[in-house]
Structures are given as C-alpha cells and as structure tokens.
Image (cartoon, rainbow, N blue to C red):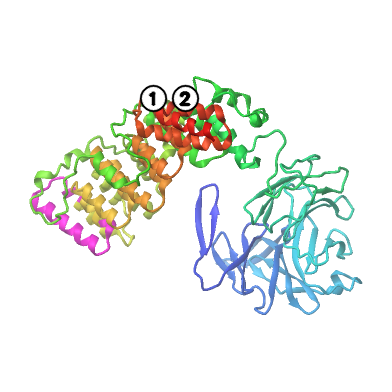
Amino acid sequence: MLTSLNVFPGKVHTLFEGNDKGQIVMVKVSPSRIYCVVVFKLGRMELWNIKSRQLVREMVIDELIRPSDVEWYPYVSRYHKVKIIKDTNGQERKIERCILSEQLFVCGQIDEGSPLMRLKLEDGIMSGATCFKNDIIFKEQNHKAEIIKISWKKKIAILADKVGQLFLIDCSTKFNEAKKFSDRHGSKVEDIFFAPGKKNMTFLVKYSNSVDIWEIADDEKPELLTSSPMLPSNLIHVCWAGPESIVMATEESCLHVLDIARKTPMSPVENNKDDFVHVKNVTMKSKNSPISKWKLSGIFSAALMEPKQAFLFKYSLQCNIQPTNDAIEHHLSQIDRATLKYIQDGSTSTAERCYQVARLFGDKFDMEFWTMVQYASQGAKADKIKLKDIRKPLDLMEICSNLLMPVPETNDLINLDLSSDLDISSCSDNQRSDGDMDISWLNSMERDHSNVGLVTGLGEMMKCSHYKVYETAKLDLHNKRRCDYRVKRVCSSRYIMTGRVDMAVQVLMETDTDNTEFKADYLMACLSSCTTQHTGTSLSTVKLAATHLIVAGQLSDGVDLLCLIGKHLDACKYLISYGKWQEAVWLAKTNLNEKECLDIIYKWADHLWNKSQRIKAMLLMLSHNQFATVLHMLCSHRQFDTAALFLQSCLEQGLLEKSEYTDSVFVEFSKLLTVTEYNSAVKHYCQLAGEKGDNFIADLDKK
C-alpha cells in the first residue's frame, strides 16, 4: 500500500493498496512534488501523479531491466507552449500553457555497456529512454562495473559502482566525464546522502559497517573529512541530524552520533581500537565503546554508566540519604544544579523526587508510575484494604471482588417488564446543542494538578469525573470539525451512548440524500426520538432487537440500541464478551455510576494482568486509588525498589497503614541496596522495617 500525507491539513490519501504488485523497495518524489516513481522488488517501476492520485505509466522501463537505484535530476525546466484554436465564431484564440520538464535517471542492469539511463517527463508524458554507455561516461577509464547508486545535488552527480569505486560528474562543464575520487575495493556502497542546506556540498557514503564523509570544494575534487571505524555490528540506517552531524543506527540497538566539527569527542570506555580519523585540518580521535554509545562531554547519561554504578546512583538520588558512596560523587556535578537542589531538598516528597530521577534516567515506566502516584494521591482517602503476605501469589480477581458491593446481574434480555428499571430522563440532563467545545473546566483541572503535567495526557487512566467531562468536550469538538461520513457515524453513535439523543438526532438528520446510508440514518433518528417517550412493550422490542443484532455480528448497532433504552451496563458486558475492552471502559466511565464503573475497570485490570500487560494493569489500579493492591502487584512483579519507595510515599501521605507485611517490603529493598554497598540506606530502611530489619542487619554482621 502507498499513501500520501499532506502535513498542513493532516489529510491522508491512498494511492493504491493490495499485495498483487509485490514489495515496494523504493519511492522517489520528483522535484516538482507532482510525480513519484515507485520501484517494486521484482524490478517493476510505476509513475504516479501524487495530486490526482492516478497512475500515469504502469511500465516506466522494460520488465527485463533490474534497477538498483533511481534518482530525479534536482532541477525542473519550465517553458511556455502556445496553441492556436478556433472558437465557435471561427475566431482564432491563443492558449498559452506552462510545460514542466523533469529528468529521471535509472542505474543498474540496463543493457550491455550501458550502466545509466535517462528518462524525460514532460507534461505528464514519459518520453523514450536515453542510455549512456561506459565509454561515454567514463571515457578512457575502461570501466565495466555496474553502477548501483546515484545521488544528485545542484549539477553534481555522485556515482558508486558494484566494486566500491566512487565517481563525480559535474554537469555544469562541457565535458560530462565521470572522475574517480575513491576506491574501496570490495566494500559495497549502500547509500549516498547529501547534507541539508543549499550551499552545503558535504555528503556521506554508507557502507555495511562504516561511513565516510566527503566535502566538495569549489572547482575541486571531493575531499575526505571523516572516516568512521569499523563498527561492531552492521549499520541499519544513517541520516543527517544537521549540517554538520549524522546519526547512525546499528543492529545492536544503538545510536551513534558523530559531529563533524567536534575536535575532541570522548567515549566511556578506554579503547585505542577503531578510532575516528579526521583527515582535514583537525586531528579527531574518538575511542569506540564496545556498547557503541557516545558520551557528550559534560552531559549526564545513565546509559554510559556501569549497571551496578547506575543502580547505586539512582538509589542515592531516590532515597536522598547521606552519606552516599564516594564512587558516584563525581556524577552529581553533571546534573543541572536546579534539578539536583530540588531532588536533595528535604521538603520534596518521595513521589516528586522519584519522578525527577526517572526523568534524569529516561525510565519510561518510572515516569508514568510516579506521575500517576502524584495524580491519584491528590485528595485521595486512606486505602482500607490491608496488605497481605507478599510471598503469596497475587489473585487480582479475588481482590477486586472484595473491593465492591455485588452489582445486580441483568443478563436476561427478554424480560418484558422493563419500565421499572429505566430512567431515560436522567440521561439527557445538561445537554449542549451548539456543538462547541467548552474548555473552561480544563483550565481549572490543569491548575489543580499542574505539578503532575498535563492531566488529559493520562487518557484512560484519568479519574472517572475528569474522564467524562473531557471525553464529552472532545466529542463536541469532533462533531464540530467532522469532515467525512465516517466521523459523522462515530459522533452519532457516541452521542447515543452518552444519552445525548437530541444531538444524535441532529447529526443523523444531516446525512445527504445521495449517501447510501441515508435511509438507515433517518430511521435511526426516528427510533432515537421515539425512545424518549417509551412504554414497557416498545422498550422490550428494542432490547430484543439489540440482542439479535449483536448475535448476528452487528455489535455496534446493538450497543447503540441498548444505550438508547438506558442499558449501559448490559452494553458494557456485551462489549467485554467480544473483547472490546477499550470501548467498554469508555462507555463505563462516561455513563455508569461509580460502583458499576469500577467493576468494569477491575475486570479490565485483571484481564491485562493475565495477558502479561502488568504495567498497564498497575497504572490502572493506581489511578483508582487501590494503593495496597498496587503495592502487592509491584512485589509480585519483583520490583521491590519501586514498591518500597511507593510504600514510603503512601505512608508520608497517610494512604496506607504500616503492618508486618509492609516491613517485608522494606527488608526486600534493603537486600537490593546491599548489592550496591549503599550502607547508609540499608540501615535506614532496616530501621523502618522494625524487628524484621533488625534480624536482617544481624545476619549481615555475621557474614
């Protein structure tokens, strides 16, 4: 499949889809941004018009030709063509048109003695091919190797052949002869990229496990600037990060950053092998690390530290207990002073300190976890659930079943007496009909929770009250800015599910008469309007129809009907039974009462936990103030360091009570700290663990 994205409006258009054409290996867009050429794995090449999304030419070159690279000439020629026509009165009129002319170069196995082909594209019409033979391009160099790469900038072309030779062609001169400037015999050239900037004539040549950087001076042949070492693993991709820096990605999941202008780069490991060598003006030596990570001077990077030292440094910042180990003192100078002062301030809470440390170390889980801790703990009440023995296996479903009062089951969908348990009038309170997004609530919410970042970024982890208001406002915004029928269908369905029937009817009645769904939408609008004045018989009919629709595979329509008659809990259960957990949680958080909503959320958390999505399950339980359960989940996941710090944060805010089982958490954390030889922290957490901590200290002294 090939799609085009217009960045400014954000619209995506599909040029073609399907697997009948084979794998796409290359897509090159013309300088006019009107056409693109698509090369498939089997050698087939097609020309497409991006603006009209039409196929211009199905077979650009002969099927027997196997192109190794395709490149557009960077200049577009424009000329005016005058055509004389006669109108209906017999008078002659001149019509002037601007014709665009572009050139496409193809290299590879083209023809015997012809390594390069040129195609002309004028006004959307591809002209005949012109083949350039070896004796024309290379003159008397007796070159016979296949050209596999070509790259243009201005009127300069860089060619690379199969045996590792590089050639330059200057088309601004009278004699377009290819001049050889490099020969790495046996090293296959994989890509050639010019640096960004109109006047920047620096380019890189990518090999399988190294990179060369060249510069073309005025009226001179290319000069080698930098040559990378032979990296320990193959290069996956190389790109320019700026006019004077490149980024290299290797198979061992590492990113190498090379700054051309940097004279004294450093490496975390002392190793004299495989240095970067600068040839021009400067002498640059960078000692390559076996882990292939680059250290920028004066900037803290946890990835460059030894694992044991990194854990020690992280724990010393999180615990903030003096004295720390002397081995990490020099790392403190690399941290921003304001950040370090905030972390070491005694008034900073444990959750805030751990969040800042997570940002320093780039730990995604810790950042999400401690953000959620700060968000959930604001205004939260003490958790009444007692922590159980952390050594026992965690049964999350059993814990969740004890958190709520039993919710009455309503699985009988054929009960004809439904008038007693329906309350449709309550669903339409506080409806808004103007379709505008009221964001006044957002400012106050962000002000109340400004220290934990953007609350709306928490998504499904938001508290039910915040989530309902946010999703309602977002739905109004989508409805106001809908641009196609698909969005209209989603908006009408969501309005029905949230009980805003008037808005749903309004959206459905706006369907155009030429739309294929015109009749179905109008009938749905009539049905939605009739359910506001209901009888037991009519509602029984709607419920029975919803059941049959769901059984027949029309889940969305069946759920809409159930929501029309106020059976949101039944709709959630049907969504869950079909594996639509996201939709079920959305419906529960926007419509159900607190107990029913929590029942759905706890079931989802249990589902995530059993599906090995345990981090998301922990965050979900944490967002609903189940602190004891989250602590048990952390221990079951063997994350005793996070568990101990989380317990410490909860004790600070009075969200959990201390018990013999909480002491076990501190003891387990102390065991981790002994590995890093952070003795002052070991003693501190053993003191928090009470008798169990004293026993652990005694065992350590015996050893």
Magenta-highlighted residues: 528-557
SS at circle 2: loop
**In the rendering, at what x and y percent does residue 475 appear?**
35, 43
Pick whichever, 220 or 421, lies toward us. Answer: 421
Task: From the image, tell me which residue sits under label 1.
Answer: 653
Task: From the image, tell me which residue sits under label 2.
Answer: 349
Assign the magenta stretch its main secondary structure. Answer: helix
The circle drawn on residue 106 is none
Q: What residue type is disc 1 on?
A: Gln
Tell me the crowding category of disc 2: few under 14, some 14 to 19, or many 20 or more residues within 10 angstroms, Cα based.
Answer: some
Judged left or right of residue 82, residue 314 is: left
Answer whether labels 1 and 2 touch (C-beta < 8 Å): yes
In the image, residue 408 above or below residue 97: above
Q: Residue at x 41, y 47 (%)?
A: 614
C-alpha span from label 1 to label 2: 9 Å
Tell me the crowding category of disc 1: few under 14, some 14 to 19, or many 20 or more residues within 10 angstroms, Cα based.
Answer: some
